[in-house]
Amino acid sequence: MAAVTSIMRAHQILLSQLDTLLKPHDLTFARYEALVLLTFSRTGSLPLSRIGERLMVHPTSVTNTVDRLERAGLVRRMPNPRDGRGVLAEITDRGREVVEGATADLMAAGFAMTMYGEAELEEMFGLLRTLRVAAGDFAD
């Protein structure tokens, strides 16, 4: 119970600090993650279903996230040429500019993890990786 409670509280603290760092860019961490995912995609676009799979969030959350990014002019929706019913989210040039600035700010702030040394961060990643592999996030 103590470990679970600590992980959950750490999540709340980190999310709050990251959202504060992203506020000047009019982003939340969830919207930032979606933009980064699009930035790393080969074409700058992905089906909404694929965004949900990769970010491990419910389709409703993806729709809300893409709605907000679209209203801000950071992504645009397009018909999926491979699936007539599907929709793609595509990052815009403005979206690329915003994610670049946001990433610079997050990196300058050490992603709110500056209280840890590199060895501690690697150890933490390793400990949490075990849980993530067991949950199917990725293969060991």
Image (tube, rainbow, N blue to C red):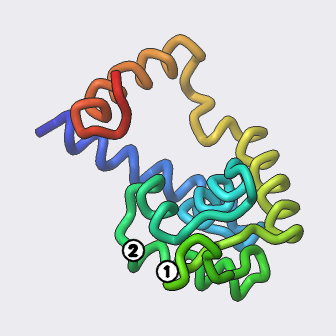
Picture coordinates of residue 111 (x, y %)?
63, 41
- Judged from this view, the residue extending furthest toward the bottom is 71
Compared to residue 5, the image places residue 84 above or below, namely: below
User: What residue sits 57% from the left and 34% below the top?
Assistant: 113
Between 50 and 15, the one lying in front of the other is 50
User: What residue sits 54% from the left and 23% below the top?
Assistant: 116
Find disc 1 in the rendering and name its residue. Answer: 63
The amino acid on which the numbered mark 1 sits, given as a three-letter code, is Thr
- Judged from this view, the residue extending furthest toward the top is 119
Quadrant showing the C terminus: top left
Q: Secondary structure at mark 1?
A: helix
The amino acid on which the numbered mark 2 sits, given as a three-letter code, is Pro
Q: Which mark is residue 132?
A: none
- Residues at marks 1 and 2 touching, judged by CB atoms closer than 8 Å: yes
Find disc 2 in the rendering and name its residue. Answer: 59
Quadrant showing the N terminus: top left
